[in-house]
Amino acid sequence: MKEYYQIAEVADILGVSKETLRRWDKKGELIPIRHPINNYRVYHISQLEHFEELQLLLNSMWDKEAKTKSKRRYKSIELFAGAGGLALGMENAGFEHVLLSENNKDCCNTLKHNRPHWNVICDDIADVYFQKYKKQVDFVSGGFPCQAFSYAGKKLGFEDARGTLFYEFARCIDEVQPKILLAENVRGLVSHENGRTLETIQSIINELGYTLISPRVLKAIFYKVPQKRERLFLIGIRKDLYAKTLFEWPSPYNRIMTLRDAFYSGDLFLNDVPISPGQTYPIRKKEIMAHVPPGGYWRDLPEELQKEYMQKSFYLGGGKTGMARRLSLDEPSLTLTCAPAQKQTERCHPVETRPLTTREYARIQTFPDDWVFTGSMSSIYKQIGNAVPVNLAAAVGRSVIRTLNLLEKSTRQAAKNYKEKEALDT
């Protein structure tokens, strides 16, 4: 058990900003102390034990849950599979994919290259039919792109959602009727159209015959992922099975992973990050970025460089904390975007003055080093940036496996009871 926690680490665990911690310090509510060895400002565990968030880490069931084994090889279908983050995590949890649907050719080639035995359908999902898998598949998952619905003053049902990609997800559920479904999306779906989009999605899932577990936004940093990424997960259990099983969200890992864990050998990877291609900065931008300290951004530049780099934005309001942003080895990465050198969402290497490479990107998403991405460099960055972190997917997948195991046990017990009753009757 750790005795001391760094300020950035506590901010991540509690889900508050470092500025909030500074305010608490000024108010005397939570005051850092000096580490007895290195004299850094830190918090002692005794100062944090009353926070529920830390209690979850201290009392984590992660190690036990990581040993989850499926009672049989559960079959699954993955929609909008992308470069395979969710699919690989589910495979690691114990699922056998019978079909993966994706229409981006580079993503399809990535999937086929890494898993030649996977049945990857590279086509418009509207042209994919799933009837032959009816009640032959245990689980359907997918991160459907969030599209606006046309409300026309009424609550939409399944048929009214035609033309949206969620409709295609729902159509697959309707045709396959899996035991459990998982829908994954950006956190913004919670507030999209003032919550009406999520309300419609929930209504349609109910209409299709599924009881929806209360949706939850999961923070990747709690699931052995060195990245401050948040994703919304929806889990539905078929109504005729709901009373026979139980779903519980995964426990958090016992500590927060940082970029140091991502780039060097340790708990997360056996070796240092491999050398790989990456974008580069123009000469002048590199000269300016060299002045940004680890964990810093444009406001840490000398004022003349702030004005040069920010131009008109220098005189506008707002923090713009993603601009000229250098990451820190001792913190998780900010959420990865589709390119590491975009001015609004800079992701500069913590030590070297350059954008993150493609393999560094992949490690932050917890892809294994032998997972190869195909296509141009910009396509590879996009594939990785859009992916679900593998370790997060695996943690959720193990929760689904445990739910199916309970259902399998219930089914077997029911069959046993029936046979015993039949024997008594004869």
Image (tube, rainbow, N blue to C red):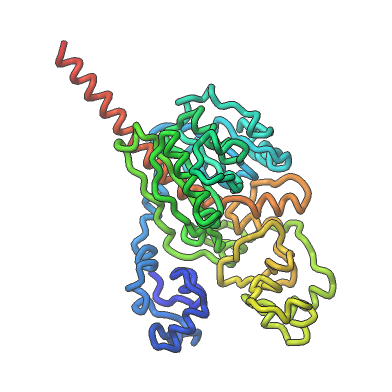
Image quarter hosting the N terminus: bottom left
| Residue 31 located left or right of residue 304 | left
Image quarter hosting the C terminus: top left
Image coords of residue 53 (percent x, y)? 39, 66
Q: Is residue 127 above or below residue 372?
A: above
Report the residue that reaches farthest toward the front. 153
Residue 117 visible at all:
no
Looking at the image, which residue is at 79% across and 64% down? 280
Residue 391 visible at all:
yes
Residues 378 and 391: in front is: 378
Looking at the image, which residue is at 48% across and 24% down? 134
Classify residue 334 by image quadrant: bottom right
Classify residue 192 by image quadrant: bottom right
Image coords of residue 109 (percent x, y)? 71, 39
Image coords of residue 310 (percent x, y)? 75, 77
Residues 230 and 421: in front is: 230
Looking at the image, which residue is at 32% across and 73% down? 50
Q: Is residue 390 above or below residue 229?
A: above
Report the residue that reaches farthest toward the top. 426
Report the residue that reaches farthest toward the right. 283
Image coords of residue 21 (percent x, y)? 47, 80
